[in-house]
Image (cartoon, helix red, strand yellow):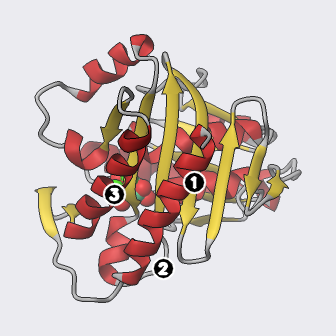
Amino acid sequence: MSYLQTACNAAKLAGKMIFSQVSTGIIAEKKSSNFDVVTEIDKRSEKMIRDFILEAYPKHSFLGEEESYGAEQPLSQVLQDARDVPFLWIVDPIDGTANFIHGILGFTVSIALACKGELVLGVIYDPCRDELFYTELGKGSFCNGKRISISEEEQAADCIIATGFVSTPAFREVNIASMDSIGKEFRSIRVLGSAALHMAYVACGRLGAFWQYGLSVWDIAAGVLLVREAGGMVTSTKGKVYSLSDQNIIASNSKVHSTVLNCL
Ligand code: IPD
Ligand code: CA
Ligand code: CA
């Protein structure tokens, strides 16, 4: 089985399990604060994906959101070392846990593969709409078997942009502040509750752009490649080419990128 097929199968397996558990009275556990929560299902999903991938490729490395929480090695170090790691799978087992807990249908599974620090594959599965977004370096982006591409709109006023709420107060503050200027330029702002879903929607043209401060690599790694391979652009909020340790990013159809940059 190819790496892509393995990632797609793992994402679907976990996604269907998560979807079957919506509104079943799952208890949220606090991580760092009331804004930062996790459930048994996040952990179950991560274990399913981990087992699936490592059974196929026992020598590969695995970076999952839940197992990295409280891990001894700081994430910044893991990402710095990623440049020397031949195969690093980067996984968000439920992106959109707050939606999942509140019974709102907007959550995804996100799986990326980085080889020596370079993103080579990305899969985002939305079990709520049964949409499987996937890409490989140099091969374009797809959703349920059809090629996708970014929106053609040139003007911000013709585009919807999305953002998100992070748990860290300082990032939240700067993100909320930036809505003021961005809200004046774009047709509307959406907060769908899953950064991975936002990235997939930029890739397939539903959104013109997405920006957010305070993201983690598992939220966006798959989405970054998906957007690039769909013809879009991903940079830091300072306009630099995305690197795995960037937390503050803009992803767009490239035509409205400078409008977002100028607003921040
Ligand atoms: C969160 C979602 C949300 C984004 C937050 C993320 P989680 O991920 O992607 O849209 O705004 O920054 O932490 O906690 O649901 O995996
Ligand atoms: Ca996430
Ligand atoms: Ca998560």
**Mark 2 vs mark 3: which is more N-terminal?**
3
- Expressed as whole percent of the image width and height from the top left, the position of residue 181 reads 58, 50
Instruction: Find disc 2 in the rendering and name its residue.
Output: 105
Q: Amino acid at mark 2?
A: Leu
Instruction: Report, in whole angstroms, how far the alpha carbon at label 1 lies from the one at label 2.
Output: 20 Å
The answer to which of 12 and 214 lies nearer the viewer is 12
Q: Is residue 92 above or below residue 116?
A: below
Instruction: Find disc 1 in the rendering and name its residue.
Output: 8
Q: Quadrant of residue 14?
A: bottom left
Instruction: Report, in whole angstroms, how far the alpha carbon at label 1 lies from the one at label 3.
Output: 13 Å
Characterize the local packing of mark 3: few (<14), some (14-19) or many (20 or more) Cα atoms within 10 angstroms: some
Which residue is at 82% across, 60% downward?
158
Q: Amino acid at mark 3?
A: Met
- Expressed as whole percent of the image width and height from the top left, the position of residue 77 reads 26, 18
Image quadrant containing the C terminus: top right
Instruction: Specify whether 198 is left or right of 185.
Output: left
The answer to which of 57 and 258 lies nearer the viewer is 57
Q: In terms of secondary structure, where does tag 1 sit? A: helix
Characterize the local packing of mark 2: few (<14), some (14-19) or many (20 or more) Cα atoms within 10 angstroms: some
**Mark 1 vs mark 3: which is more N-terminal?**
1
Q: In terms of secondary structure, where does tag 3 sit? A: helix
